[in-house]
Image: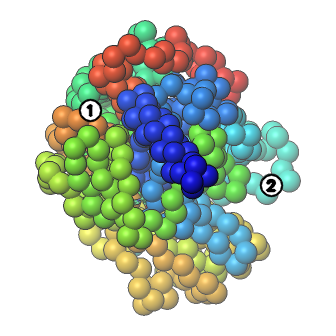
Amino acid sequence: MELNQSPPRLNLTLLFFFLLLSSLQATTDTNICIVGSGIAGSSLAHFIKHFTCTDPQNPNPGSCSWIDDIRIFERRAVPGGRMATVTIAGDTFEAGGSIIHPKNFHALRFASMLNLSHSPESDEESDSWFGIWDGSRFVFKTLQPPPSWSSFVVKKIYSLLNSLLLFRRYGFSLIRMNGFVQGMLDRFLLYYKGFEARPVFETVDEMLKWSGLYDLTRRTLGEELIDAGLSSHLISELVTVVTRINYGQSVSISGLAGAVSLAGSDSGLWSVDGGNWKLAAGLINYSGAKLHLNEEINSISHEGVHYVLNSSKGNSYKCEVTVIATPLDELSIAFTPSISLPNRRLHHTYTTFVRGLLNFEYFGFKHASEIPALIGTLEVPDVPFSSISILKKYDEEDMTYKMFSRGPADDSLLDQLFSVRKETVRIDWPAYPHFKAPEVFAPILLDDRHLYYINSFENAASTIETSAVAAENVARLIISRLEKLASGSPTIKIPASNDEILHLDL
Ligand SMILES: Cc1cc2nc3c(=O)[nH]c(=O)nc-3n(C[C@H](O)[C@H](O)[C@H](O)COP(=O)(O)OP(=O)(O)OC[C@H]3O[C@@H](n4cnc5c(N)ncnc54)[C@H](O)[C@@H]3O)c2cc1C
């Protein structure tokens, strides 16, 4: 008789301990759900662990205060989002976010922490061989580089001659343009300051006003550059070429997005060997977050003390904190209660990869070897592409190219542009915001509880680094708001200073 009764007693005891444990956990631990595994979502997971775990490299619940569980949902089969690669005839190339600035200190630190090797984006000489195409002729071309086996002196003379050519065409405006970009970079560097000197921001407007970058979002790049003393010649040619390559848009984008885009033509740009997506994959792994691939979040509703996330796999997840780490402009996640966002649209960049050979006759040459390695274009109505660049040269008649355009590149267009086409890959990227001045920013806090939106910062500028900077702020915001709610706050490990990352050996 007794024997028969003992199992239920044991079960009740177990149940009691289980309930006690889970109630303790509910009051002391927080779980965070992140929608999107790009650099925003992955770096958020990293920063949360970095700021709350005594041993971020071993982020088990015991070594982390509060945050016991981070889940990242990704609708695609691989992490990284707009940091993605494409494979053409066995070679892998960046398809989305490809170049990282030497002063992008979060990305640099991530690469070094994750032991990811990185290389200059491309060979400096061939990079500086560019032409500006107006739809019927090249209005400007730099010199064709000397052969790669040329001496150091020959290469130096080549680069000097190119600088002279540029100076002859655009004069001192070039120096003023560099000053404009440097001014933006100096302000951006403030986001790496130590926590004691840098507040946590609840809105994008606050964040930009604090660094002095807000005013640049009020006016167009064109207006800002005229005020900075640049000639209209430089703005309508070189600056236009750069904004069309980097954001697919004209100089009517906001001054801040434009300055960031111009910084993308600086020297020293780099990318992670094998693909920048490795930054996201590495950060997720390092943070110990659970990654749910092929699982799209369809709805998010606030119920009681939780958000309930329903996924395409029919699963429901209860999350105390939910973070949106993807632009919401073209998504159809159903929010209950509904959220309010400015009505925005993304700029689509059609990216076409071709292995083959450009048609030299289309560009008015006698031989393909005369075509510059990078063709930029002016803001004129009939140019069917924004840029074409050589990604890899196998021999004089066989290359892989990347072409950006504002519309899809159909076969008839490609057959005009290319005389040989062995392989073609097309990607329609919902690429970045359609920047306009004055910018209106979506909220970071989507409700008065714990629903956060990292990509509200993307309307300031859209880059790998700006997503990481925005994610770091959201990580601090989550921690500080949870801390305010908690009674008898556990210690949150927030480094006294972030300044060490400014002293990385570049
Ligand atoms: C063609 C192109 C070129 C670029 N060039 C550069 C460059 O050279 N340098 C640079 O710094 N930046 C560049 N950028 C911009 C840069 O890539 C982006 O700003 C940055 O990668 C954005 O990262 P993110 O994490 O904020 O968003 P994303 O990378 O877009 O990540 C969002 C993720 O969320 C996922 N997702 C969306 N909805 C759901 C859902 N409902 N459920 C689950 N998952 C969901 C998406 O699949 C995606 O993986 C470029 C972008 C493009 C498109």
Residue at 28% in and 37% down: 450
Q: Mark 1 — residue?
A: 204
Marking on residue 148: 2
Q: Amino acid at mark 2?
A: Ser
In this view, 239 is above or below 217: below
Q: Nearer the viewer, residue 77 or 227?
A: 77
* Residue 378 image offset from top left, x and y in percent: 36, 60
Q: Amino acid at mark 1?
A: Val
One can see residue 218 in this view:
no
Secondary structure at badge 2 equals loop
Q: Which mark is residue 8?
A: none
In which quarter of the view is residue 250 placed?
Answer: bottom left
Please state if 325 lies on the left or on the right of 501 as rendered: left
Q: Residues within 10 Å of mark 2 (few under 14, many from 20)?
A: few
Residue 275 in sight: yes
Residue at figure coordinates x 35%, y 40% from the top left: 321
Q: Quadrant of ligand 1?
A: bottom left
Q: What's the colour scheme?
A: rainbow
In the rendered structure, the answer to whether residue 101 lies left or right of residue 339 reads right
